[in-house]
Amino acid sequence: MPPRAWTTPASTTIYGTRPGYDTLFFLTLISLITTLHDRWRPVHEVHEVLSRGEPAPVLDVERG
């Protein structure tokens, strides 16, 4: 069998990926989605309030 043109560290085992690589990938993906959701949910809620024509809510946000 000819060698692969593109060899990555994840494709070096018999089954094509290192043990735990898929788990690490999905845990990282879930962490990213959760972080982005927690960050942008308040922004989305303010946009919903403003789209209904209501005044903007007062947000208790510490800046520092």
Image: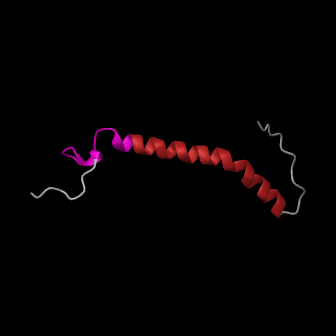
Does 48 appear above or below 24? below
Q: Does the magenta stretch include residue 10?
A: yes
Nearer-the-camera pick, 2 or 19? 2
The residue located at (34%, 42%) in the rendering is: 21
Q: Give the farthest residue toward the front.
A: 64
Range of the magenta residues?
9-23
Q: Quadrant of residue 50?
A: bottom right
Q: Quadrant of residue 20?
A: top left
Residue 57 spot, x, y in % from top left: 86, 50
The residue located at (79%, 54%) in the rendering is: 46
Q: Give the farthest residue toward the left.
A: 1
Principal SS element in the magenta part?
A: loop
Residue 40 spot, x, y in % from top left: 68, 50
Q: Which color mode does the image show? A: secondary structure
Residue 3 spot, x, y in % from top left: 14, 56
Does 40 appear above or below 60? below
The residue located at (74%, 48%) in the rendering is: 42
Q: Is residue 1 left or right of residue 56?
A: left
Count the marks.
0
Q: In this view, does 38 lie to the left or right of 13?
A: right
The residue located at (25%, 56%) in the rendering is: 6
* Quadrant containing the C terminus in the rendered view: top right
Does 19 appear above or below 44? above
* Quadrant containing the N terminus in the rendered view: bottom left
Q: In this view, does 44 lie to the left or right of 21?
A: right
Residue 16 spot, x, y in % from top left: 24, 49
